[in-house]
Image (spheres, rainbow, N blue to C red):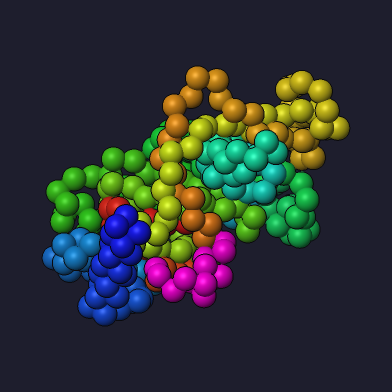
Amino acid sequence: MAASLVSEVRNALQDLVTTYHELNGEHVDELNEEPSALEFMRYVARNRPFVVRKGASKWPAVQHWDYHYLVDKMKDSKVNVAITPHGNADAVITAADGVRYFVKPYEMEEPFANFLAYVQRQERDGDVTSNVKYAQTQNDNLRGEYSQLFEDVEEDVSWARIALEQRPDAINLWIGNSRSVTALHRDNYENIYCQVIGQKHFTLISPVETGYIDEQSLPVATYLSLGPKGAGEPSEPLPELKHEKLVITPDADSVPVPCATLDVNKIEQDIQEIHQYRPIQITLGPGDMLYLPALWSAG
């Protein structure tokens, strides 16, 4: 009886996903100019993402940001830096004890110039062995610790502000290289991503396919430093923390948190095996914008 019910639910879900994609397609619209507020609201009503190619190309950030410009603007400011062995901060990871955890990065304050030089050097040298650094605070940081750079971007996206009748709750800046990975996650609010430098690859999964992201409640852990030789008790890090051993350490008295356990890096293999969900993959280049509706999973 139970097995039959599970099968019926699975088949019904698959029918729903199939119908959804037959109606909406397995792609996102690509616009060559910014939409009007009314056009944007139509996408919001349908809960469908879209890309605006070169929509932010006139921003001073897109036109001027490079290493020297950014360092000159930030001066001697220190910023929060997330550090992990493989670039997967705030991700689901199986630890040495065989337990899967939601693992937070090691965090430290570092002069912005040192951080940016490290990120660039790692990319330029093709370094795949040293620890990965990533600026990823999500606390309205472009109007906080990166406020010197805020004047180089629009204070809001006009068509979204007019349509939603409010200004952004938060404006965040992320800085990383090709080894930085964003874990699959979903938000309950609208997001607009604007690419300034380089490329960002997105894997998107619609809300009707949420059942396939295999969300589970997992214990929380944090990467801690064991020093340059990877032995001993957690210690104070070296200034650059390039090769220090980082170990997953369970947080004391933490409450399990719900996490998507689907690995987007293996998503093509999974699709070939089970043919159930149909993720959409998008790449943004400099000046491109992506509207990501509420409750869409992205990684």
Question: Quadrant of the image for the N terminus?
Answer: bottom left
Left or right, 171 with reference to 149 = left
Q: Position of residue 254 (x, y in %)?
A: 48, 24
Residues 232 and 273: in front is 273
Please say if 104 is above or below 281. above
Q: Where is residue 52 in the image (x, y as percent from the top left)?
A: 34, 69
Residue depicted at x 52% and y 39%: 102
- How many tags in the picture? 0
The correct choice, above or below, for 182 with respect to 42 in the image is above
Which residue appears farthest toward the front when viewing the image?
A: 1
Residue at (52%, 60%) from the top-left corner? 264
Q: Residue at x 48, y 37 (%)?
A: 218
- What residue is drawn where x is 28% and y is 40%? 169
Q: Nearer the viewer, residue 126 or 249?
A: 249
Q: Which residues are the magenta region? A: 265-277
- Determine the main secondary structure of the stretch shown in magenta: helix
Task: Left or right? Give the position of 105 relative to 32.
Answer: right
Q: Residue furthest right?
A: 229
Q: In this rendering, does residue 283 appear at all? A: yes
Q: Where is residue 7 in the image (x, y as percent from the top left)?
A: 33, 64
Q: Which is nearer the eye, 270 or 170?
A: 270
Residue 267 lies in magenta, yes or no?
A: yes
Q: Is residue 60 visible?
A: no
Q: In this view, does 229 lie to the left or right of 214?
A: right
Residue 263 sits inside the magenta stretch: no
Residue 257 image offset from top left, x and y in percent: 43, 35
- Quick check: 102 left or right of 33? right
